[in-house]
Image: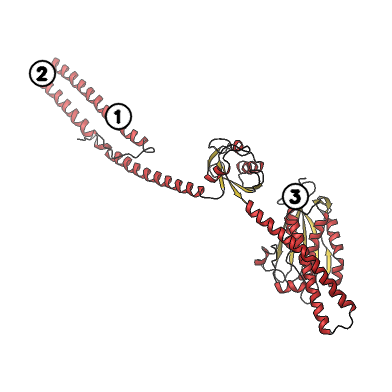
């Protein structure tokens, strides 16, 4: 039967004091002294027993509380009713902790099942670069070969994966606390991976390896098919164009209707010939077959060469082509390729940048130094035409994308010029974008790294 701590102590001390009073009344002074000593001894023994009982109750509660994290604690009972509230609170806390731990374990199992079902390989490392966990795809991907050792938790990642791209990607995520992306071709023979590493909030990083070998093979097949078809079309198109030109130039007996038909054939054959040429260029650029020879070249020289190359079209279209702000700073780029990019942008400005009322185009080409995000030179080609709606700005660099399809076909555009320009610029470490406002013209801008900051 449980007893209150205060009640138990009060009862025992009352009995002791009553015994002292009786000894004082019934016995002689000597007996009273002896009785007092006996009472004090009785009180000491009771105090010892009481304190031991309290310590046992507290120890039981302490042990039960410490065991909450490892196992659930059943209903607790204390010898003293004063501790019943504490015991009940510990029991309730134990039940709550058990539910939380069960939920966390279930969530962890679900997360592990989800990660294991991924087709991508996932590996997490701590701040020291030691592997914390991986999914089954990673275990199957690297079971232990001559190129790597088996994936083991607690081992350093560099002991498991010796691919420099993967290790550099994880290193950036660990040291700079930033998302890093790389492309790996040496992790496994004949396989290509996209590697993305991200820092984790509590420290460490997680890396995801996405196998893009099949995608690369499909894209390579598509490029080869386009290149082969374009190459095969060049001969018949050249023959058609040549025969039509011969008829138009040397056959005087053609009726007006026949001449109109032949002119239409010549126009479309020329457009198809231009399309095949652009497709071949696009295939070479995307497959990296086009050899570039980057070297330090002055930015103002590139602008002047591009303007001079477009002088014929400027005269034919009666356009106005101006050179704006320029800089003599050198960029590290392939001169012919960048002049072609500028020429392409100038041609688009002349075709689609005609101002209202005047009926002719005005294009301004500029180059200036910029320091953000890196030290570079920014080239710009601006026209003052109708402009481009904002919903088209993010897509105009896609292949075959046209803002105004009817107008593009009428002007003979193929829809590949901007896509080619983007690939050429990005291949040389630059970036390209477009800014526009309706009825206020458009500006195409691209950056190239300075010669002194470029990585050779």
Q: From what the image shows, is residue 24 above or below residue 88? A: above
Task: Report crowding for label 2: few under 14, some 14 to 19, many 20 or more residues within 10 A (C-alpha).
Answer: some
Q: Confirm whether residue 179 shows in the render.
A: no
Q: Report the disc number at residue 27.
A: 2
Give the spatial CA distance, label 1 vs label 3.
Answer: 73 Å
Of residues 301 and 36, the one drawn nearer to the viewer in this rendering: 301
What secondary structure is found at the residue carrying circle 3? loop
Relative to 214, 306 lies left or right: right
Q: Which residue is mark 3?
A: 375
Q: Earlier in the sequence, mark 1 or mark 3?
A: 1
Residue occupying the far left of the picture: 26
Q: From what the image shows, is residue 382 above or below residue 26? A: below
Instruction: From the top left corner, tell me how far across and down residue 126 is, in percent.
Output: 55, 39
Residue 220 picture quarter: bottom right
Q: Report the disc number at residue 55.
A: 1
Q: Confirm whether residue 139 shows in the render.
A: yes
Give the spatial CA distance, label 2 vs label 1.
Answer: 38 Å
Q: Earlier in the sequence, mark 2 or mark 1?
A: 2
Quadrant of image for the N terminus = top left
Give the spatial CA distance, label 2 vs label 3.
Answer: 108 Å
Relative to 121, 277 lies left or right: right
Q: Earlier in the sequence, mark 2 or mark 3?
A: 2
């Amino acid at each position: 039967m449980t007893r209150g701590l205060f009640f138990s102590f009060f009862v025992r001390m009352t009995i002791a004091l009553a015994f002292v009073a009786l000894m004082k009344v019934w016995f002689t002074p000597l007996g009273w002294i002896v009785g007092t000593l006996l009472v004090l001894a009785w009180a000491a023994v009771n105090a010892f027993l009481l304190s031991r009982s309290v310590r046992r109750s507290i120890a039981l509660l302490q042990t039960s509380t410490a065991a909450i994290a490892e196992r659930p604690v059943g209903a607790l009972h204390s010898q003293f009713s004063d501790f019943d509230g504490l015991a009940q609170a510990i029991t309730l806390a134990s039940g709550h902790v058990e539910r939380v731990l069960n939920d966390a374990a279930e969530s962890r199992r679900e997360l592990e099942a989800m990660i294991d079902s991924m087709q991508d390989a996932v590996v997490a490392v701590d701040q020291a670069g030691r592997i914390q966990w991986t999914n089954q795809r990673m275990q199957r991907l690297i079971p232990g070969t001559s190129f790597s050792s088996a994936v083991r938790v607690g081992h350093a990642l560099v002991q498991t994966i010796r691919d420099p791209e993967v290790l550099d990607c994880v290193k950036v995520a660990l040291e700079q606390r930033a998302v890093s992306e790389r492309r790996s071709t040496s992790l496994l023979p004949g396989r290509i991976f996209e590697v993305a590493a991200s820092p984790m909030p509590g420290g460490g990083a997680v890396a995801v390896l996405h196998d893009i070998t099949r995608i690369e093979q499909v894209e390579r097949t598509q490029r080869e098919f386009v290149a082969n078809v374009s190459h095969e079309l060049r001969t018949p198109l050249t023959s058609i164009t040549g025969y039509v030109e011969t008829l138009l130039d040397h056959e005087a007996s053609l009726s007006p209707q026949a001449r109109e038909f032949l002119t239409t054939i010549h126009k479309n054959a020329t457009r198809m010939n231009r399309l095949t040429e652009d497709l071949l260029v696009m295939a070479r650029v995307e497959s990296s077959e086009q050899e570039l020879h980057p070297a330090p070249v002055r930015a103002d020289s590139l602008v002047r060469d591009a303007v001079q190359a477009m002088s014929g079209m400027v005269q034919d279209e009666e356009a106005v082509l101006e050179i704006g702000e320029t800089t003599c700073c050198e960029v590290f780029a392939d001169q012919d390729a960048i002049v072609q990019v500028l020429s392409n942008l100038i041609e688009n400005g002349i075709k689609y940048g005609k101002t209202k009322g005047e009926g002719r185009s005005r294009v301004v080409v500029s180059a200036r130094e910029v320091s953000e995000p890196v030290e570079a030179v920014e080239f710009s080609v601006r026209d003052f035409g109708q402009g481009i709606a904002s919903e088209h700005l993010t897509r105009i660099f896609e292949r075959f994308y046209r803002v105004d399809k009817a107008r593009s076909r009428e002007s003979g555009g193929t829809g590949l010029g901007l896509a080619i320009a983007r690939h050429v610029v990005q291949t040389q470490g630059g970036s390209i974008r477009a800014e526009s406002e309706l009825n206020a013209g458009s500006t195409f801008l691209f950056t190239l790294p300075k010669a002194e900051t470029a990585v050779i």
